[in-house]
Image: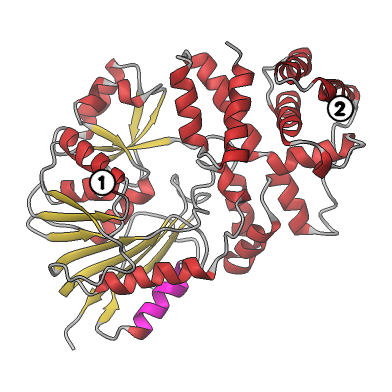
Amino acid sequence: MNIRNSAFKVLLAVERGGAYSAIALNNSIKENNLNSLDASFMTSLVYGTLEKKLTLDYIIKQYSKIPLKKIDLETKIILRMGILQLLFMDKVPESAAVNESVKLAKKRKLQKSAGFINAVLRNITRAEIKYTLPDKNKNRVYYYSVKYSCPEEIINLWIKSYGEENAVGILKSLSGRPALNARVNTLKTTPNELIKELESENVKAGISEIDSSALVIRGTGSIENLKTFKEGKIYIQDISSQLCVKALNPEPRDIMIDVCSAPGGKSFTSAQYMQNRGKILAYDIHPHKLKLIDKTAKRLGINIIFTDVRDAENDKRDLPLADKVLCDVPCSGLGIMSRKPEIRYKDNLFNPGLYNLQYNILCNSSRFTAVGGILVYSTCTLNSSENNKNAERFLEEHKDFEPYKIDLNVNRTIDEKENMLTIFPHNNPCDGFFISAFRRKSL
């Protein structure tokens, strides 16, 4: 089979069909039964092309007489892949990068484009200086946009919210594949025991410097095939999500509500904090996602999670009062772009409608927090309008709640109120994330 053609199909599905890169890539690897070497090459092609799209398009414009907007999408994707191999993948010979790109164009019945692709790529191989970045002194944001392949709108947001130094730090963290983080199922094993078992499955794992029940793992292949996974001793969850649960601090015999629970990781981790004693009401608007939560809970040996369909924003039905309420709301996802690089190119990322949805979910869900109970609001984005501003507004408009201090083992990068924490990926070994916590008081 042709790895480049499979990578092309994934990229086309992402660009044209709005597919999620991780899902499309994993499905393709499974369908083609790729070995670890081929899977690694395909992964590098797909994620590298998505991560560097703006940079690659900038280079195309330097070599093409045809305006970028007039180049058809399929030709553009093949060019991007070819330039990626030429300039950013050391182990691919120049001849292979050029010749295989031309072959791919012909295979896709792009005969008219094959000569154009060949000319552009061969001109790049002949050039002494492959490309030059924009003048940083004339337009710093445009320079950062091309260098780090990130839209100027996002960069401006980060500079305004967090300062230029942090903005550049975030941009640098976007390139390359981040480490895979997992949660040890402490109901079934211990971190050290699990590390030994993973070693026997040829998987390297180490305990996270931030959370002793979190692992950083490498060389897993398909994790679903691991014996430890099938036995329910491990599941994938970024450390930032695990820290969110730590801030909530669920305890044995608590009643907890997780209002936007899919895919379920925070409910599973909460069940471990609760030693599988108490009750977790896990809600989501999508029934099929709840079925997956039920299936995973069974694999993990958790029996205190009860799922049901519910619209977190609009459902006005009463729920039982809970000791802990978690609102991990839908968001723009700017904190997880290293895992999902296509997010940065989406339209309408800064949408006041989304901010209102998040705030409405928080307000509607706060009704079920018992006096003395803890309410946590979280997102996996880096946008103060979705994060701090919503949290501050909530306290202003809900006098029956007070700030609840967040004390976690992470680097605080910016000055924030003690009940708010923005986790930055350039200063912590995890995804970008925001957590805020409140305690209900009696009036």
Quadrant in which the N terminus appears: top right
Q: Residue furthest front?
A: 109
Q: Residue furthest bottom?
A: 443
Locate residue 353 relative to residue 85 in the image: left or right: left
> How many residues crowd mark 1 within 10 Å: few (<14), some (14–19), many (20+)?
many
In depth, the one of 75 and 300 nearer the eye is 75
In depth, the one of 19 and 401 nearer the eye is 19
Q: Amino acid at mark 1?
A: Leu
User: In the rendered structure, does residue 388 fall within the stretch colored magenta?
Assistant: yes
Tag 1 and tag 2, C-beta contact below 8 Å? no
**Quadrant in the rendering for residue 284:** bottom left
Q: Position of residue 145 (x, y in %)?
A: 72, 51
The residue mark sitting in front, 1 or 2, is 1
Q: Position of residue 262 (x, y in %)?
A: 31, 49
Please state the extent of the stretch shown in magenta in the rendering: 387-396
Q: Which residue is mark 2?
A: 120
